[in-house]
């Protein structure tokens, strides 16, 4: 995924291996899709959404959060948080 030019497109093009709901397998791509959905629905960045609803309430004041080539904050890894 990180080598791809469009992470969301890459994720959505992956084949479905198991019937939905039949097995659990962690996948950072799913978390990244959630970040893309939050960005699209909120009309702002995932970081703005997280600042308002997660970071500020938890007292997190500093963070570094990697973005994909389309500017979507990575949902499954690459975030560093500090108070």
Image (cartoon, rainbow, N blue to C red):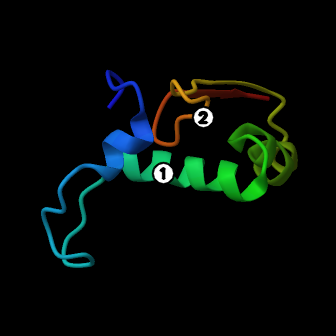
In the rendered image, residue 58, in percent from the top left (x then y), is placed at 80, 47
On the question of residue 28 being in view, the answer is: no
Q: On residue 33, which mark appears?
A: 1
Q: Nearer the viewer, residue 61 or 49?
A: 49
**What quarter of the picture does the C terminus occupy?**
top right
Q: Residues within 10 Å of mark 1 (few under 14, many from 20)?
A: many
Which badge, 2 or 1, is on the more N-terminal residue?
A: 1
State the residue at coordinates (51%, 24%). Answer: 69
Identity of the residue drawn at 59% across and 55% down: 37
Residue topped by disc 2: 73
Q: Is 28 positioned to the left or the right of 34 in the image?
A: left
Between the C-alphas of marks 2 and 1, the distance is 10 Å
Query: Which quarter of the image is occupied by the N terminus?
Result: top left
Give me the residue at 81% from left, 54% from top. Answer: 53
Is residue 44 rendered to the left or right of residue 71? right
Q: Residues within 10 Å of mark 2 (few under 14, many from 20)?
A: many
Q: Position of residue 82 (x, y in %)?
A: 73, 26
Residue 18 can be seen, yes or no: yes
Residue at 61%, 29% in the rendered image: 71
Q: Residue furthest left?
A: 17
Determine whether, in the image, residue 56 is placed left or right of residue 66: right
Q: Where's residue 13, x and y in %? A: 27, 49
Residue 24's place in the image compared with 72, above or below, is below
Give the secondary structure at mark 2: loop
Instruction: Describe residue 48's horizontal placement relative to residue 3 as left or right.
Output: right
SS of the residue under disc 1? helix
């Amino acid at each position: 995924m990180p080598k791809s030019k469009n992470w969301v497109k890459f994720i959505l093009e992956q084949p479905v291996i198991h019937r939905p709901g039949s097995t659990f397998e962690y996948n950072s791509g799913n978390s990244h899709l959630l970040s893309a959905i939050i960005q699209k629905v909120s009309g702002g960045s995932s970081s703005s959404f997280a600042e308002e609803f997660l970071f500020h309430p938890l007292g997190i004041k500093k963070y570094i959060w990697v973005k994909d080539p389309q500017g979507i904050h990575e949902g499954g890894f690459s975030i560093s948080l500090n108070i």
